[in-house]
Image (cartoon, rainbow, N blue to C red):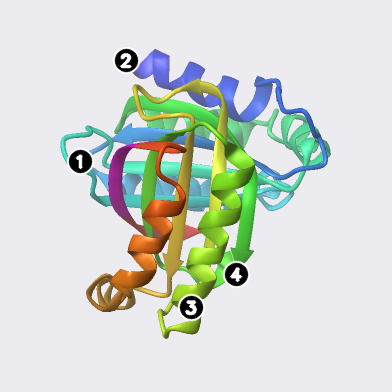
Amino acid sequence: MRIKLILVLALALLGFNATADDHARPFTVFIGISTDNPAAVVGAWDTFMASDCGKSHPGQVSIMNEFFNGEYPATHTVIVSYPNQQAWAQGVANNRCLEWSQLMRNVSTVTEPVFQTLGMGVLAGGDLSKDGAYTIVQMDVLDEAKYAAAFEDWVKAQIAAGQKITSYGIVRTVGGSQGNLGTHFAYIGSANGLDQLDNAATSDQKLMQKFRSKVSGMRTVKSVSINYVAKRY
């Protein structure tokens, strides 16, 4: 399993070919891991990102703590985001270094791989840099454009009603495997866990019912989870 994780990281972050129809779009690698030593995982990434090799990395790296995700075995998700495929290509070149090899060895000794996917952004709003917590809805979507429009209208209405939402978006899965968790996921970000819980408690149910009626038949929800930002580079 340790060797498998090294291969997953190498393929996902270095040699995975984008399959999207628009190379100018941002896209993101999601690597789910299980670990009982998260401090060691963060420490390994700290060391890499502080190196010359890590400093030249063209994407953003986030380590997420999967706090409420039901029976799914991943404890954390490493997210590597690139603004476009050109940035991906630069990352491939930059990460062929000794520090990268050491990162893979260090992480593989304290983790087990759970999933890896490549996602393409369909919709994005707000400011991800202000996020500390997310609600994630995994789903199958039949009409991407109509669902995205309805979702954005609903989120904007919730913000106007006083919800503390710092970002939102929809990501389409275009490669990799994450089990039976659907074709897309939607996310709603908040500054911290308290704001996230407050949003859940004060959500306008009339707006929610209107949204559900509008997207009826467009989606099938697979799972709903909550995660927090453990570290972001």
Residue 232 drawn at (x, y percent): 50, 59
In this figure, which residue is indicated by the disc labeled 2?
1
* Magenta residues (range): 221-226
Residue at 38% in and 39% down:
138
Disc 3 to disc 2, C-alpha distance: 44 Å
Q: Which mark is residue 57?
A: none
Q: Amino acid at mark 3?
A: Ile
C-beta proximity under 8 Å, tags 1 and 4: no
Q: Quadrant of residue 179?
A: top left
* Mark closer to the observer (1, 4): 4
**Gap in Å between the C-alphas at discs 1 and 3?**
37 Å
- Is residue 68 visible in the rendered image? The answer is yes
Residue 28 can be seen, yes or no: no
Sequence-wise, the earlier of marks 1 and 3 is 1
Q: CA distance from mark 2 to mark 4?
A: 38 Å
Q: Which residue is mark 3?
A: 159
Tell me the CA gap for discs 3 and 4: 11 Å
- Pointers 2 and 4 in contact (CB under 8 A)? no
On the picture, is 151 further left or further right than 110?
A: right
Mark 3 vs mark 4: give the one in front: 3
Can you identify the residue that label 4 sits on?
A: 126
Per the image, is 92 magenta?
no
Q: Position of residue 59 (x, y in %)?
A: 68, 48
Q: Amino acid at mark 2?
A: Met
Q: Looking at the image, is 162 positioned above or below residue 7? A: below
Q: Give, as a three-letter code, the residue at label 1.
A: Asp
